[in-house]
Image (cartoon, rainbow, N blue to C red):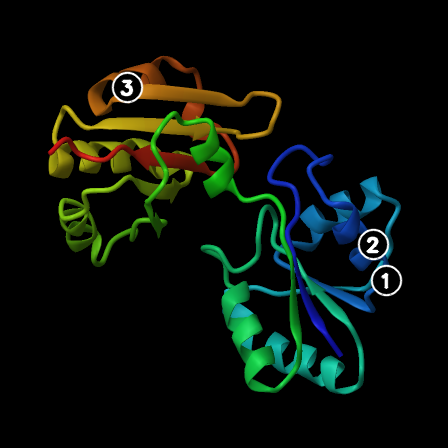
Amino acid sequence: MTLYVVATPIGNLKDITFRAIEILRNVDVIACEDTRVTKKLLSHYSISKPLISYREQVHHTVSRKILSLLKKGKSIALVTDAGTPGISDPGTRLVSDALNAGFPVVSLPGPSAITAALSVSGVNADRFVFLGFPPHKKGRTAFFGKMKEFTIPMVLYESPHRLYRTLRDLEAFLGLDREVVIVKEVTKIYEKIIRGKIPEVIETLLKINNYHKTRGEFVIIINAREV
């Protein structure tokens, strides 16, 4: 009757803890974002478990099902496609539902694109603010306008097909001289780190063939402004 929040690899399948593998082998059910992605991970470690697809669009239906299983004494692992559930991820609502219903929730820490990218960025990350994904449409102007107020490093997630647009917005709101770090495919075979002022980074990205077709997410780190 426990919900385990299990961090899974963000790229390299070896980046998983022994404890995470043990829990995935021993729980009754695994709730995951995309069953196809999770099946690849489980197959790699010869694990076979019933899967429940948990996505934001079906939160209420799946949450009720998972709470019902917990009431029956079942143990459930919650995973996301990559990284730690609940970080820019719908898993937050499921965790909240389980806690409100009185069930224990246990964290199995592990990979996170935020900390992985910051650790190799060269940016002083004693303090930083994580802003998640920028809004696609509504609230986008206000989002970037608010960023001008921060005097510490900022971290964003972005998808490949919106990366160029977001960098142009950062350029417009934060200025040409602001330094950024783009971490692409972190922990994967084609991992790449691009550092420089925003126009320089945009120019570098445009030289990379098909960067906009890259799957997964980019981490954008905006260095603190000079004061």
**Residue ID at (36%, 41%):** 126
Q: Quadrant of the N terminus?
A: bottom right
Residue 27 lies, with reference to residue 213, above or below; the image says: below
Q: Decide which of 48, 215 is in the foreground and name it.
A: 48
Residue 183, position in %: x, y?
44, 29
Q: Quadrant of the C terminus?
A: top left
Question: Callout 2, which amino acid?
Answer: Glu
Question: Callout 1, which amino acid?
Answer: Asn
Q: Which mark is residue 22?
A: 2
Residue 25, position in %: x, y?
85, 57
**Residue ID at (43%, 22%):** 193
- Whether residue 68 sits left or right of residue 166 in the image: it is right
Q: Residue furthest front?
A: 126
Residue that label 1 marks: 26
Q: Decide which of 226, 45 is in the foreground and name it.
A: 226
How many residues crowd mark 3 within 10 Å: few (<14), some (14–19), many (20+)? Answer: some
Residue 153, position in %: x, y?
28, 39
Q: Residue furthest top?
A: 207
SS at badge 3: strand
Question: Callout 3, which amino acid?
Answer: Gly
